[in-house]
Amino acid sequence: MNIWSIANQKGGVGKTTTAVALAGLLAQRGRETLLVDLDPQGSLTAYFGYDPESVESSVYDIFADAAAGSAAHPDSVRPTGCERLSLVPASTALSTLDRRLGARDGMGLVVARYLAQLSGRFDYVLIDCPPALGLLMVNALAACERLIIPVQTEFLALKGLERMLHTLSMVTRSRRLDLPYVIVPTLFDRRTRASLDTLSQLQERYPDHLWSGTVPVDTQLREASRAGITPCQHFPQARAVTAYSALLDHLLAAVDPPVPAGAAV
């Protein structure tokens, strides 16, 4: 089972969209895929029609169960309406975790231990992270084998990237293991100077970790979200879907033989 986290310490850069787009493409290519929503705002959960205010058996319950000392966690996996794609939803109660459980020993590995119980059910797990350093971010980085950092191509997003890379450095020192990561330029609009200048700075500063492509601004992503389906289900020919498919090929090349988009598995 391959576990990828999608994170940035700035909101609005396309984390949830990236998680849904990549997960939908993985499922389309025949991989059993699980999305895990670690963001208390629950955008990923709401995307698939679940209410973070009232959803039963969420990520919060997994943490509460672990804090109570139970070795077995509740089965919080829910269907998404997309074949081969499932979801562990978030609850808004996750916003209280740092205050209630942050000081307890062993809380940084709750998600890793939970996912270990699911290793026979899924080929890929994608974790959507909150835009802040805390217990949930630490869990995501401790559980994953690869980090995907979406960065909106505008100046302020570069500051969020710097904070994210500082956090990554701290976590990798703690776990004494390098965590491979890829920076993904998102919301790119080649008609604007801001996008072009930001992309140029990313290419200059992070040449070894920057994905060579870009994810363009695409209204079809918003339409897919409104419909509650993955972008590749909504409009397979959309520019952003084409970009995410190329990104997925890049990511799979490191762990899996590349499979052409749409190929039967």
Image (cartoon, grey):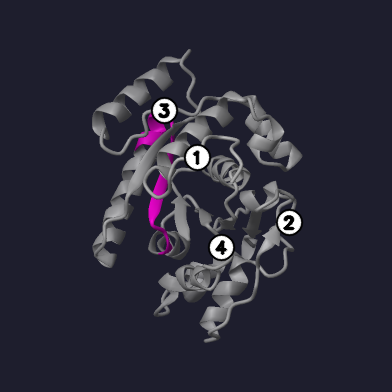
Quick one: SS at disc 2?
loop
Is residue 27 or residue 191 the one in the foreground? Answer: 27
Crowding at label 2, few (<14), some or many (≥20) Cα neighbours within 10 Å?
some
Query: Mark on residue 182?
Result: none
Q: Is residue 44 above or below residue 72?
A: above
Write the residue at 74% across / 63% down.
54
Mark 1 near mark 2, Cβ–Cβ under 8 Å?
no
Given the image, on which type of amino acid does mark 4 rest? Ser
Marks 3 and 2, how far apart in space?
Answer: 34 Å
Q: Is residue 233 magenta?
A: no
Rendered view: 75 above or below 27: below
The amino acid on which the numbered mark 2 sits, given as a three-letter code, is: Asp
Q: Earlier in the sequence, mark 4 or mark 3?
A: 4
Which of labels 2 and 4 is toward the front? Answer: 2
**Which one is in front in this view, the residue at disc 1 or the one at disc 3?**
1
For the magenta stretch, what is the residue range?
A: 143-158
Q: Give the camera-side residue of 140 and 34.
A: 34
Q: How many marks?
A: 4
> Which dot marks residue 259?
1
From mark 1 to mark 2, how far is it between C-alphas? Answer: 35 Å
Chain-order first, disc 3 or disc 2: 2
Q: Residue 51 — which label?
A: 2
Q: Mark 1 vs mark 4: give the one in front.
A: 1
Q: Residue at x 25, y 27 (%)?
A: 204
**209 to 168, vertically: above or below:** above
Find disc 3 in the rendering and name its residue: 213
Q: Is residue 188 left or right of residue 265?
A: left
Q: Residue lying furthest top in this view?
A: 191
Circles 3 and 2: CB atoms closer than 8 Å? no
Q: Which residue is mark 4?
A: 95
Tag 3 secondary structure = loop
Q: Position of residue 58 (x, y in %)?
A: 64, 67
